[in-house]
Amino acid sequence: MATVVFCPITFNLAEVTRMIEVARALDPAHRAVFMGYESDFAHLIVDAGFEYRACEPAMSDAQREQMMRFDQGKTLRSPLTDELVSARVDVERALIRETDAAAVVIGTNVTSMISARAERVPLFYAVPFALTRPQVAQTRRLGLVRGSGRVAHAADRVATSLLRWAYNRAPLAPRAFARVATANGVPPLKTVVSLLEADHNLLTVMAWELRGYTLPAAYQRVGPIFAHLDAPMPPIVAELAAREEPLVYLGLGSSADREMVLAAASQLGTLPVNVVAPVRHYLRDGDDLPPNVHVTDLLPAHRLGGLVDAAVLHGGQGTVQTACAAGIPFVGMGLQPEQVWNVDQCVRRGNALALSPKQAGTPALAAAVQRLLSDSRIRAAAERVRAEFADEDGAAASARLIEEAVAAP
């Protein structure tokens, strides 16, 4: 059978778990080989039983912070230099040849846009719909300027037009990608969209997120893909769920920061609730959280349905989809346009409320959580969304498409 190489960004929790789910769904006769550069969540790959190659060069902490800011549109400076991009492309090409890979599957490992094509191996990108080429091209207002009045709507249309031009036409990709691509015999990557579009783009969304949109031939909806961690549920979760007070889940993934954790925890500490918070990876020794906020390591959030009454999330697709599938209403505070889109889609379905990240440390967060706990309409909407998610299996759909490609002559 075939070898499939998986290249997630291994300091991004959602990407790692999304790739694990797709690899699990492949026919066991296929060989799944993972590679990554940073060690943060690589242990989840090993724990899931997959072969993992730890590769170099890894990014420094400063480079990773800069990369996060670049991804979130907060800076035009990228840590992706000629030396880093070239070295990674060389490593990836060597691994593809060594394993005789028949396909490469990525999250946002953008150097694979060069390495897979240089090796003439089909490239699959499991990706949310937000900020893809069809979404940017066909969305009148992308929500870049928040607000409900005429002025805000007009400003958002202008901002959307500017982003659309910059995204599709402006040479904003780090220059290393044009130079290294040319050196590897691949057409130069110059625009933002060229870094975010593979041969096969697998949209990890619900059908209702695509209503009114037309997808190009290289795009297919596969459905939600989110983590099903094998880790045991911490005993504290059952203990808190059995108490009289409501139980709230604070899930901020891997793209938030310590300040947001502390701010949200301070507001949840003002409520007559208990909180389970898998945010230990953000905290420092000496951080003082309210006594009703119980910090844990990562936990199997897909099993929280029936235990948790509400959630506070950062808006990453993995955390949002996990809450949806578990029937948990949530407050979402998107940190960048893709996360804002994820939250807004659920606000329209009625199972979520949206706040800005700046409101994490304000009474607005406490008020939103109280509304989730008291509004029967939001809870009913969450149950409807849960039923819709029950019929979806994005990992299996992705695996079928990959297997069809590798079986083709």
Image (cartoon, rainbow, N blue to C red):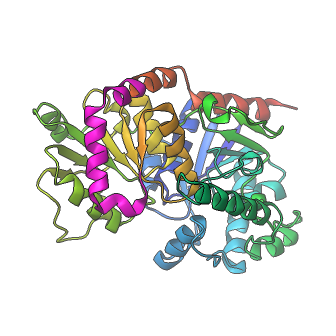
* Helix, strand or loop for the magenta stretch, by majority: helix
Give the position of the C terminus as an image quadrant: top right
Q: Nearer the viewer, residue 221 or 298?
A: 221
Residue 365 included in the magenta stretch of the image: yes
Instruction: Report which quarter residue 108 is drawn in.
Output: bottom right
> Does residue 253 lie above or below 347 as drawn?
below
Q: Which residues are magenta?
A: 355-381
Residue occupying the point 25% across, 70% down = 284
Give the x, y percent position of residue 24. 54, 34
Residue occupying the point 13% across, 44% down = 272
Give the x, y percent position of residue 329. 36, 35
Residue 42 included in the magenta stretch of the image: no
> Does residue 128 lie above or below 403 as drawn?
below
Give the x, y percent position of residue 126. 64, 43
Side (left or right) of 40 relative to 204 = left
Residue occupying the point 46% across, 52% down = 13
Residue 26 in sight here: no
> Does residue 285 lie above or below 351 as drawn?
below
